Amino acid sequence: MKIIDRYILTTYLSRLLSVFVILMLIFIIQTFWLFIDEIAGKGLDTEIILKFLAYYSPKLYPLVMPLSVLLASIMTFGSLAENYEFAAMKSTGISLQRALLGLVVFHFFLGVGSFYFSNHVIPLGEFKYYNLRRNLAKVKPALAITEGIFNDIGEMNIKVKRKYGENDRFLEDIIIHEKTPDRKNNIVIKAASGELKSATIGQELQLHLFDGFRYEDIQVEKNADKEKMPHAKVSFKKYIMNIDLSQFNDVDFGEEKYTSTFRMQKVQELSTSIDTLERDYLREKSTYSDNFNKTSYFSRLAKEKKRNFVLTDSLILQSSNPLVYVTDGFKSNQTQILRTAKMDVGTMIRNLNQRKRTFFIYQKLINLHKNTFWEKHTLGFGIFFLFLIGASLGAIIRKGGLGLPMVLAILIFLSYHYVSLFGKNAAEDSSVSPFIGSWLSVFIIAPFAIYFTYRASTDRGLMNADYLIVSLKSLSTQIKNSIFALRNKKA
């Protein structure tokens, strides 16, 4: 490695490392405030909190590294151009392409390393973070109750409409499903309000329920008794439930039993999951299509024809031309036929809409797997092209430091990031293919990277203003001449 390559690489790496560390700390602090409701007030050790942030931090790499590369490259090459070091290089015959050679090689390996990081470290961090977060939710169940959804708290599932009061201990509109040994939903409790209180002795939390009902399906052994569907219903003004806190105070934060989310999977695992999901999806669609055709109105119509039902069009309604069944020479009741047909069509439409939503969710799950698969490949390319854009802009604007470079870096990165989000969101609902949605931001910035590199290497600036003005004047003259010729032709 020559001295000039070592000098540029050392200068760039020092800025890249410092910018990366600063941005990572900023994003980690933002993450801490994002999850403050899940962490604060649970008496967690500092070690557990640091583990939580450490497990979450790999997810920040796809945000922090591209921005760090862009900002560091603008600062480095802007400083070199501002201090006329590029002018000195060019005077000795060293072009911009030659000055970039060492960093191009470095970013090639950085792109490969980013793929490895996104394929191994990020899934591992997601696995650790997801399991630790689920374990944290078991600590102090009073704080683990989220409004509007069912929450798994010890031996029950609880849903509340609203929490209020000191430490959110007052609850409103409560629904509870008690867990039974057979894991069936046999006991349901509904109450208008409730209050969480600490028990006087032992490791228990008391839930006081007010103005409600308790429903229980009674389990019997005889089939004859089962047909009677025996159950019990009890109303109450006040009902006290005890929640054992020993299991919450002795939570195993190292427990790792959730392994099924697509963000935890590597490229090979994602590929297998995608193939399996697509195979099952096509099988579900094919099965539903066959069943629908067998049970549809037109299928029954074909069966009736085979049974020698006679179709006639002798009776024509005012607004339609329906088919009228004739059986043994007697005309069927038209009103009854139309009513039955309307009910059948309504049932089929509702069934189709329901299955449409189901298939949409299934397809969205497949698209999410594909998005994650392609994201691991696009990260390295995005970093490389952002480096070329940053280096070229730095050489063109000839400004180092944290002023203009910071503004440019944020604007460019936000454009890149939001285009990426737009593509992924469009791919989720199948507006575009997951491949296009994931690669859209890379496809857009690649031409800009090549164009800016060309402009910087030829000392032409961002754009040729004179050429633009001349082109606009020429276009204006052509339009005027065309309008003048058209008027003369009409005269």
Image: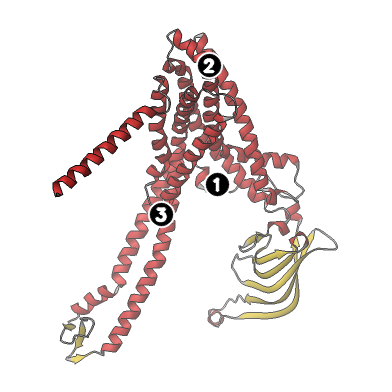
Vertical order, 149 against 69 (above or below): below
How crowded is the residue under tag 2: few (<14 C-alpha within 10 Å), some, or many (20+)?
Answer: some
- Asked if the residue at tag 2 contacts the one at tag 3, i.e. Cβ–Cβ closer than 8 Å, the answer is no
The residue that label 3 is drawn on is 363
The residue that label 2 is drawn on is 8
Q: Select label 3 or label 2 by which is in front.
A: 2
Mark 1 and mark 3: span between their CA atoms? 21 Å
For the point 42% across and 9% down, which residue is it?
93
Residue, far right: 200
Q: Select label 1 or label 3 by which is in front.
A: 3
Residue 392, given in percent of the width and then of the height, sits at 46, 25
Residue, far bottom: 330
The foreground one among 6 and 476 is 476
User: Residue 19 appears in which quarter of the rendering?
Assistant: top right
Q: Which is nearer the N-term, disc 3 or disc 2?
A: 2
The foreground one among 36 and 420 is 420
Secondary structure of the residue carrying numbered label 2: helix
For the point 49% across and 46% down, which residue is it?
262
Mark 1 and mark 2: span between their CA atoms? 44 Å
Q: Select label 1 or label 2 by which is in front.
A: 2
User: Residue 18 appears in which quarter of the rendering?
Assistant: top right
